[in-house]
Image: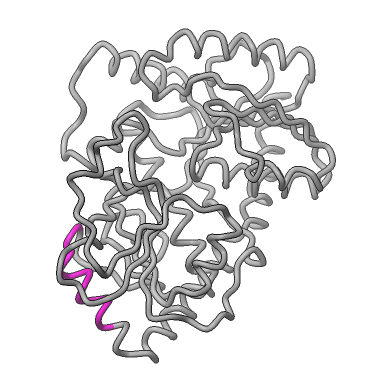
Amino acid sequence: MHVLITSDTVGGVWTYTQELVTGLSKRGHQVTLVSFGKLPFPHQTGWMKTLSGVDYRPTEYRLEWMEVAESDIAESRRYLELLIDEVRPDLLHLSQYCYGTLDTHIPKIVVAHSDIVSWWVAVHGREPDDTPWMRAYRRTVTDGLRGAEIVIAPSQWMLDQVTRYYGEPRAAQVIYNGRTPESFDPHQAKQDVVLSVGRVWDPAKNVVLLLRQGQEFRVRIVGWEREPGREDRLRNVQVPANAELLGPRSQEELRTIYANAGIYAATSRYEPFGLAPLEAALSRCALVLNDNPVFRELWEGAGTFFEKNNSEDAARVIAKLRKDSALRENCATRAYEIACQKFSASRMVEQYEQMYEVVSTAKAA
């Protein structure tokens, strides 16, 4: 089967794309991959060099959630239409809502990785203001979901959110994201350090819970410290002596950082899936999780939860695991086992393969 997949090069969507494209290629499928947003760095594309049947087309068209993106969306739609005529794929696998309305007979799958409205509600406790731009965004998402043969979400919670705010899709399925266990090191001796991966400036990632003064544990945080275009955002964040901000790191660097950490703190208040806790689990870290609905859905029985958005309770749970090595190791092993059973890349790719066949057969009929 020949699948045209769209992606963007920022954050977890690109990691998800890497696992999916790699798995499809190794199973003999042909992939045309188109990325939007910023052009990737060389270290982001090295994984493609060993794959056969992958045709990569990077672009710099702005993404649909960015303001003043209307002209880019229109131009990128035209670009995709021409590309579809050129390569003639059997299926469109779209990581952006706006392409769900492409005028084509080829079956379209739209993946709901995240959206602005559910993000806003999780962060601010209310829906965003009804501005002209927000109305246009909602219309774009709604139309894209309706135009897809099927909508895929990485968690039931995320599927419920897009249904709630944009309407019922004609068909829908939850396929959990996956990572390759062999990409991580679960056997390294652990250090007495707490790790978290998340943009410091992003209130959805909520890593400020780990930056309170007076906390006794050593904490390392990986991720961008400043929001692009708003470099003054970090001025309101005081970094205590026990914390170390590592900035963004490559996947290879992260592998070592995960392997050394005894505890991973997943602090997000908004997380449609959360690849970082999965990567930590595959590195046999004990998971300490903010009590949000997605983490409950994915990690119930495999992680230790703290009261939602409560830094004091997070510190309490972390202290308990630090003091009890047997409990910590047991939690880490349980998280590792669940990660391998439920969230492997091979399982994700197999589910997508099965869904591709169903959608293609139904469209042909």
**On the image, which quarter does residue 255 sit in?**
bottom right
The C terminus: image quadrant = top right
Q: Position of residue 124 (x, y in %)?
A: 18, 38
x, y percentage for residue 314? 22, 69
Residue at image point 48% right, 25% down: 97
Where in the figure is residue 172, as x and y percent of width and height?
Answer: 49, 37
Give the x, y percent position of residue 348: 61, 52
Q: Residue at x 54, y 19 (%)?
A: 61
Q: Nearer the viewer, residue 182 or 242?
A: 242
Secondary structure predominantly adopted by residues drawn in magenta: helix
Bounds of the magenta segment? 309-320
Residue under the point 20% across and 50% down: 237
| Residue under the point 21% across and 72% down | 315
Quarter of the figure with residue 123: top left
Task: Locate residue 195 relative to residue 177 in the image: left or right.
Answer: left
Q: The N terminus appears in which quarter of the rendering?
A: top right
- Is 52 above or below relative to 286? above
